[in-house]
């Protein structure tokens, strides 16, 4: 599967209030708002917000469901993605420490793991993030009044999955998804796909005493990580491969409007998604207007007024388009 899985596609988390989340990603992490839409599954009206780098590339996309309005909290624990990591130039880490302090964002000191310097920080709802110093990442960062080109995050570096046992999750990453184990640092295990590095890295952290976290959609946890394949044909091949190995709970291919997806529960408890890369975010608003409009998939358009009336009002602070 190493020729089919190309690294991380997106990460999806449950967060608190919608505006608080927009302010965090747009102003603290300095991400471009890429899409304002709604949860496609179930009956409950919930926003689905997308953020990414300047080019809204696969491998930079964070998506969030603001669950505070619905009053549903999820419990953090093992069997979840614990840390979502972004890359930025190594020389920017001092800037990030000051930036977090200025905005009252809880963060750690500069630490080194697997030979790379990194800074750990928290989303207001408790989600854990990291900025990893990586000068080899040439993706285009989004800039803001406070975050220059030299400091901007480029996209995802990795996700860190918390597991109570390494064995079967390691086997899943290698046999089912085509990653290779490339190192160990304390209780962290490193897996990479393709040429490795930014966007192509997954860590397992061995936390045998941490109770299993929630699988539900709710405030305060990562719900799943998606891995990128090129197109429907590749997604179908991965689905058959998963089923052949015995992971028979691989879902049907779902239409997520901007990509097509297969979901599979991994042995460590983490929900993994296989998502296609050939549709993208410019299908219902032009690239320069990404994130400016409230968009629904065609099959929900008939209920637009009713859906939007139930959702809290939000403002995208980037509505005057920058970086164009
Ligand atoms: Fe997803």
Image (spheres, rainbow, N blue to C red):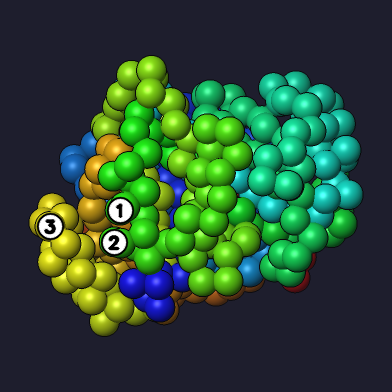
How dense is the environment of label 2, judged by Cα within 10 Å: few (below 14), some, or many (20 and up)? many
Give the camera-side residue of 46 and 261: 261
Return the residue at label 2: 176
Q: Earlier in the sequence, mark 1 or mark 3?
A: 1
* Residue 120 in the image, given as x and y percentages of width and height: 67, 32
Tag 2 near tag 3, CB within 8 Å:
no
How dense is the environment of label 3, judged by Cα within 10 Å: few (below 14), some, or many (20 and up)? few
The numbered disc on residue 282 is none
The quarter in which the N terminus is drawn is bottom left
* Residue 172 in the image, given as x and y percentages of width and height: 30, 53
Give the camera-side residue of 281 and 185: 185
Residue at the location (52% across, 24% down)? 125
C-alpha gap between disc 2 and disc 3: 10 Å
How dense is the environment of label 1, judged by Cα within 10 Å: few (below 14), some, or many (20 and up)? some
C-alpha gap between disc 2 and disc 1: 5 Å
SS for dot 2: helix
Return the residue at label 3: 246
Residue at the location (64% across, 49% down)? 86
Return the residue at label 1: 172
Q: Earlier in the sequence, mark 2 or mark 3?
A: 2
Give the camera-side residue of 147 and 253: 253
Would you say 87 lies left or right of 65 here? right
């Amino acid at each position: 599967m190493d020729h089919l899985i190309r690294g991380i596609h997106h990460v999806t988390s449950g967060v608190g209030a919608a505006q608080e989340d927009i302010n965090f990603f747009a102003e603290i992490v300095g991400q471009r708002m890429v899409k304002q839409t709604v949860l496609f599954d179930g009956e409950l009206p919930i926003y689905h917000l997308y953020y990414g780098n300047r080019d809204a590339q696969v491998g930079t996309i964070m998506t969030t469901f603001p669950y505070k309005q619905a009053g549903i909290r999820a419990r953090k624990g093992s069997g979840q993605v614990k840390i979502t990591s972004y890359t930025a130039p190594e020389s920017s880490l001092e800037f990030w420490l000051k930036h977090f302090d200025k905005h009252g964002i809880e963060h750690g000191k500069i630490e080194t793991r697997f030979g790379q310097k990194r800074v750990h920080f928290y989303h207001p709802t408790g989600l854990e993030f990291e900025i990893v110093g990586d000068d080899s990442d040439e993706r285009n960062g989004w800039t803001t009044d406070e975050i220059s080109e030299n400091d901007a995050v480029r996209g995802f570096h990795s996700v860190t999955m918390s597991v109570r046992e390494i064995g079967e999750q390691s086997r899943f990453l290698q046999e089912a998804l085509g990653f290779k184990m490339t190192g160990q640092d304390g209780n962290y295990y490193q897996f990479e796909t393709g040429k490795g590095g930014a966007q192509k890295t997954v860590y397992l952290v061995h936390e045998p005493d941490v109770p299993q976290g929630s699988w539900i959609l709710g405030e305060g946890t990562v719900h799943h990580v998606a891995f990128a394949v090129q197109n429907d044909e590749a997604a179908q091949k991965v689905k058959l491969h998963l089923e052949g190995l015995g992971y028979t709970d691989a879902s049907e291919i779902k239409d997520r409007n901007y990509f097509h997806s297969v979901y599979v529960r991994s042995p460590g408890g983490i929900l993994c998604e296989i998502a296609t890369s050939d549709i993208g975010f410019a299908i219902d608003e032009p690239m320069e207007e990404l994130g400016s409009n409230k968009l629904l998939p065609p099959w929900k358009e008939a209920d637009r007024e009713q859906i939007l009336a139930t959702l809290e009002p939000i403002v995208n602070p980037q509505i005057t388009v920058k970086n164009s």
